[in-house]
Amino acid sequence: MPNIWDPKSNPDGYVSLGVAENALMHDELSKHIHDCFALSHAAFTYGDGMTGTKRLKKAIGRFLNRHLKPIRPLEPEHIDVTNGCSSAVEHLSWALANPGECFLLGQPYYGTFAPDLTLRFGTKLLPVPFGEIDPLCEDAIGSYEKVLLDAQAQGLRVSGLIISHPHNPLGRCYPREVLIGLMKLCEKYGAHFISDEIYALSVWDNTVEYPAPTPFESSLTIDPTDIIHPSRVHVIWGVSKDFGANGLRIGAIISQSNPALHDAMIAVGLYSSPSSLSEHATANLLEDDAWTDEYIKTNQKRLSEKYTTVIKWARKNNITYAPRVNAAFFLWLDLGKSYLDIHNLPDGQDVEDVVAQRLLAQKVFLASGKDFGSEKKGWFRIVFSQDEANLNEGLERIVAALH
């Protein structure tokens, strides 16, 4: 976003609390990368190919084995590296579905899933509405099946079901029994199960709400025996969120029992190959156990503190929010309700559009519910992984926009 606010150099700029970036650990990240960035001559070549260096694949596998504790240890041959997780999602769409086939996606959803899945390969998105059902509970599985059966009745084939786990924008984790239920649903109808776990290590203690939210368990921790054929299970991970490094553009497709998928990735890897400099920097990070352990611990502590700040602000200003968050770095807010508590809405106007315009008039940007396929109008996602000055300025501007 151009014209970004700075308290000294650009006090009239826009405050962005809408982009899912974590700025809380940039000093620590920058120091490690600068201290360890000596390059070998191999970094100036095509290296080991277009789907990631052997070193980086080994480093990712070892790192995730330590932190996600998969039921079957990850090996380098289970991993393809891409220039970010959007490329990983798009590659899976290309490999797992033919033009005209469909992917199930529960509402609200990470908005960029839509173009990633459908834009270039002619696949279709089937949003799954839940009404008053919690999207992350076992009852929600029936909603997925209803949409799938409706699609089949129209002659459409459902090739896959994709989730963000932890959830974006709700900031919660799927219970283990729901993950199993979704896998069984995919097996029943011959669909692939894709779990985007880009926020897997950005899970923290919620100290202001009880009972405690559902803890994170990776889909890789589930033994697929009698649940789903393992070739149908695919996990996505990257450094953009857990390491606050969106700009490094490192993502990974993890599929432990589908060698044909990895063979197919070789053909398209040319179009998603990350920079050797990013691969080198990421391998350096992931191979440093002591540093990553401390980094993750500190990051989780800071995210918990920021969440507490935003919850106190929301309660003080009587703003309704989706509770029991313990993952990622955003909060789902009903600003439409807050606006209507104060103002009458003229006939024919959309409360979400009105609030969005008022936010921009106050020079603060939030992502609106329309970007996430929200079933209800007036909801917005606020990103709280900001430095104190930026976050507080944005929160003040939101309140001003509502009044």
Image (tube, helix red, strand yellow):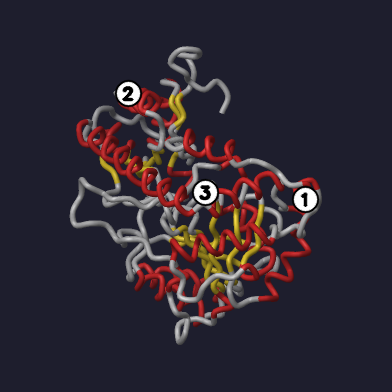
Q: Earlier in the sequence, mark 2 or mark 1?
A: 1
Choose top left, top right, bottom left or bottom right for residue 248: top right
Please name which of the two marks, 3 or 1, marks the residue nearer to the observer.
1
User: What residue is shown with label 2?
Assistant: 396
Please name which of the two marks, 2 or 3, marks the residue nearer to the observer.
2
- Calculate the distance from the C-alpha at mark 2 to the C-alpha at mark 3: 26 Å
Please tell me whether mark 2 sits on a helix, a strand or a loop.
Answer: helix
- Calculate the distance from the C-alpha at mark 3 to the C-alpha at mark 1: 38 Å
Count neighbours of disc 3 (C-alpha within 10 A) and say few if under 14, some if 14 to 19, many if 20 or more: some
- Residue at left 32%, top 37%? 306
> Taking 132 as reference, is 354 above or below it?
above
User: What residue is shown with label 1?
Assistant: 42
Q: Out of 219 and 194, give the one closest to the viewer.
A: 219
Quarter of the image with the C terminus in it: top left
Kindly identify the amino acid type of the residue bearing the numbered disc 1. Ala
Across and down, in percent, residue 305 comes to 29, 39
Quarter of the image with the N terminus in it: top right
User: What residue is shown with label 3?
Assistant: 111
Residue at the far right in the pictured view: 45
Q: Earlier in the sequence, mark 2 or mark 3?
A: 3
Q: Out of 86 and 112, give the one closest to the viewer.
A: 86
Dots 2, 1 in contact, CB < 8 A: no
User: In the visual, does 275 lie left or right of 379?
Assistant: right
Please name which of the two marks, 2 or 1, marks the residue nearer to the observer.
1
Kindly identify the amino acid type of the residue bearing the numbered disc 3. Gly
Across and down, in percent, residue 237 comes to 54, 57
- Residue at left 54%, top 73%? 233
- Residue at left 56%, top 73%? 192
Choose top left, top right, bottom left or bottom right for residue 369: top left
Q: Earlier in the sequence, mark 3 or mark 1?
A: 1
